[in-house]
Image (cartoon, rainbow, N blue to C red):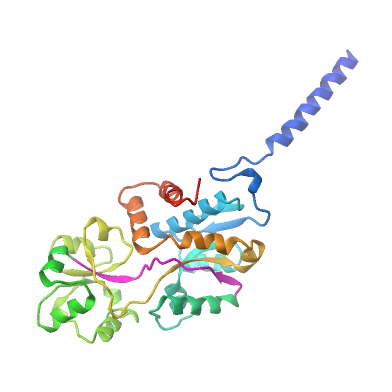
Amino acid sequence: MKKKSLFLVAVLSLTLALGGVFGCAKTPTAGTAPDKGKEGPTIKISSKTFTEAAILGTLSLQYLEGLGYPVENKMGLGELAVIRPALTSGQIDLYWEYTGTGVMNLMEHAPVFEAEESYKLIKEWDAKNGIAWLEYAPLNDTYGIVVRPDVAEKYKLKTISDYVAQVKKGETLKFVGFPEWEGRADGLPSFEKVYDFKMPKGDFVNVAMGLNYETLKNQKGDLALAFTTEPRIVTDKLVMLEDDKKAFPVYNAAPVVRQQIVDAYPTLAADLKKLSSVLDTLTITELNMQADVEKKSIDEVSSTFLKSKGLLK
């Protein structure tokens, strides 16, 4: 009996030991091959709270995980006042920021209207803070002027200069805007200066942010201030006028990463460039629409897009 008991104890101990070895093995996630995992610190990936930011963050999370980088999901941390200190303190390692936000809000620099100039300014400035701005995406989430399709056809409007020409001719075109835009450095005063005109006070329709599309839909306005990646531009079939004189600052999105993480992973910048390069303004608008209008989950929107581009298996 004693020998049998010792034998059973030995078998049990061996079983527990093997269970510990196999039980502690990490289960590979979708798109991640266990034999190509990268050695290094876990990359804590975060985002701001709005839809577009969450999509950009989730794209990075799924894509890098699929390439074998160790990642941690820290999505939806907060806006600039919260997420920036989290980055600089090391609470997170990566999130997407806009060049215009970096230049104007972080550097407190005047608005910049050229993509490369804006990017170089903030990249060089932030390098001394130990923060790397990786290659920016073509997507530009800035202000734009949208027009009802019937109005665009009637007045043959394709550019903002076309609209200004109609105003100078004396045409009354109701422009829907926001109260806060009137006094901003990159708002109405800059817009009027660049296009060398003065908007008649009676033409300006002030509404709360978010009501611009309903105002156009109800035909209480002819054209409106908008953000260039908003889904309703697509769903309402609005015409985006070309900013032919560059009145609006550039807000290209870019992955912003702690330099320590970039140093730890020499391939990270090149890998993320493959993702950034396929994200233009129309693409991110369509992804925003899938999430906000079609009510698909951000995880689904992200994984479907990555697979369609061959960036995720």
Q: Give the range drawn in magenta.
A: 129-147
Does 145 lie within the magenta span? yes
Residue 163: image location, x then y, percent: 18, 76
Q: Is residue 238 above or below residue 204?
A: above
Picture residue at 58% right of the left edge, 57% below the top: 44
Residue 188: image location, x then y, percent: 27, 80
Q: In this view, does 104 lie to the left or right of 154?
A: right
Does 206 lie within the magenta span? no
Q: Is residue 39 left or right of residue 32?
A: right
Q: Is residue 78 visible?
A: no
Foreground of the two, 267 or 79 = 267
What is the residue that sits farthest to the right in this orientation?
3
Picture residue at 19% right of the left edge, 69% below the top: 223
Residue 182: image location, x then y, percent: 27, 78
Q: In this view, does 48 lie to the left or right of 44?
A: left
In the figure, residue 265 lies in which quadrant? bottom right
What is the residue that sits farthest to the front in this orientation?
310
Picture residue at 49% right of the left edge, 80% below the top: 121
Residue 68: image location, x then y, percent: 60, 50
Q: Is residue 234 visible?
A: yes
Which quadrant would the N terminus be assigned to in this image? top right
Foreground of the two, 257 or 273 = 273
What is the residue that sits farthest to the top in this orientation?
1
- Labels in figure, total: 0
Foreground of the two, 231 or 120 = 120
Picture residue at 34% right of the left edge, 51% below the top: 290
Q: Is residue 29 above or below residue 288?
A: above
